[in-house]
Amino acid sequence: MEQLRITVDGKTYHVVVEKLESTAAAPAPAPVVMPAPAPAASAPVSSAPVVAAPAAPAAAPKAAAGAGDMTSPLAGIVQAIAVEVGTPIKEGEHVITLEAMKMYTPINATSTGTIKAIHVKIGDAVDEGQPLFTIG
């Protein structure tokens, strides 16, 4: 038995871990059989010239973070916004919740001030480093 001390979000937990020895042998992996590729069919030949389709328009670039901008620490979907423009906040106060890979992550203010602008809305997909709020 081994004792460990683990700290999660500032709270310390003492745990006892027991390493178990496995007596059963691991099963052998099943062999993988790949099907033979289908023969390629010949396509009819056309004498008409081929014209390339117009390229799709590029996605709008994300705004770069400016002074006072609080940026997203991870990529995800905005699930909840706990502040409005004009809300006074303190560093560490919860301001937004992001969902990534079915996990909800509360995001806290990175500085003290007043919310000057909100750059996202509920349901928006955000990238890591994308501005969420302007704090002034």
Image (spheres, rainbow, N blue to C red):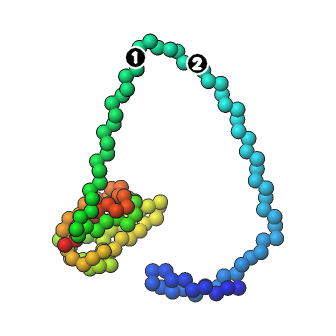
Which residue is nearer to you in this view: 129 or 32?
A: 129
- Secondary structure under the numbered disc 1 in the rendered image: loop
The kind of residue tagged 2 is Ser
The kind of residue tagged 1 is Pro
In the picture provided, is 43 more to the left or to the right than 67? Answer: right
In the picture provided, is 1 more to the left or to the right than 85? Answer: right
Q: Position of residue 2 (x, y in %)?
A: 67, 85
Q: Is residue 111 above or below residue 54?
A: below
Q: Residue at x 31, y 45 (%)?
A: 59
Q: Quadrant of the N terminus?
A: bottom right
Q: Which residue is mark 2?
A: 42
**Camera-nearest label, 2 or 1:** 1
Q: Residue at x 25, y 67 (%)?
A: 69
Q: Which residue is mark 1?
A: 49
Q: Position of residue 63 (x, y in %)?
A: 26, 56
- Secondary structure under the numbered disc 2 in the rendered image: loop
**CB within 8 Å, label 2 to label 1:** no
Count residues near mark 1 (Cα–Cα under 10 Å), then give few for <14, some for 14-19, many for 20+: few
Mark found first going from the N terminus, 2 or 1: 2
Question: Is residue 89 something one can see in this rendering?
Answer: yes
